[in-house]
Amino acid sequence: MKKAAELTNGRAKLEASGNVTLDNIRQVAETGVDIISLGALTHSVKAFDISMKWKKK
């Protein structure tokens, strides 16, 4: 990632994704990428349905 950031030299937005965890996110950020995707935030989330469904009487 660091090499890619050096090669593009700001001419392209770079995103780091995959195997990014809370433990290594700082190391990833220090490579110079612009965006970091962190799936660990959503992998174990439980869905909650807040839709409003109306039934006719």
Image (cartoon, grey):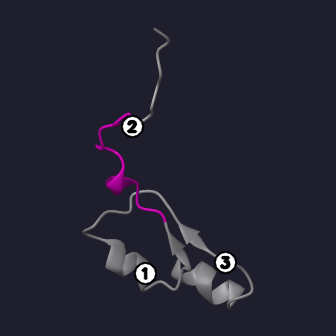
Answer few, some or many: residues within 10 Å of disc 2's Cα (few below 14, many 20 plus, some between 14 and 19). few
Which x, y percent locates residue 23?
25, 69
Q: Nearer the viewer, residue 21 or 42?
A: 42
22 horizontally vs 33: left or right? left
| Quadrant in which residue 38 is drawn | bottom left
35 vs 52: above or below: below
Determine whether, in the image, residue 56 is placed left or right of residue 45: right
Q: Label 1, secondary structure: give it.
A: helix
Q: Secondary structure at mark 3?
A: loop
Q: Which mark is residue 42?
A: none
Residue at mark 1: 29
Q: Measuring from the top left, give residue 30's x and y in whole percent.
A: 42, 86
Given contact means CB atoms under 8 Å apart, are the residues at marks 3 and 2 in contact?
no
Q: Say what secondary structure mark 2 lies in.
A: loop
- The type of residue carrying mark 3 is Lys
**Mark 2 sits on what residue?**
50
27 left or right of 14?
Answer: left
Question: What x and y, as percent, mark residue 55?
Answer: 46, 15
**Of the residues shown, which amino acid type is indicated by label 2?**
Ile
| Quadrant of the rendering where the C terminus is positioned | top left
Quadrant of residue 49 within the rendered picture? top left
Q: Residue at x 68, y 86 (%)?
A: 7
Q: Please tell me whether residue 16 belongs to the stretch shown in magenta.
A: no
Q: CA distance from mark 3 to mark 2?
A: 35 Å
- Which residue of the protein is positioned furthest toward the right in this rendering? 11
> Is residue 50 or residue 21 the one in the foreground?
50
Select label 3 or label 2 by which is in front: 2
Q: Which residue is mark 3?
A: 13
Q: Nearer the viewer, mark 2 or mark 1?
A: 2
Q: Residue at x 68, y 91 (%)?
A: 9
Instruction: Tell me which segment is drawn in magenta.
Output: 37-49
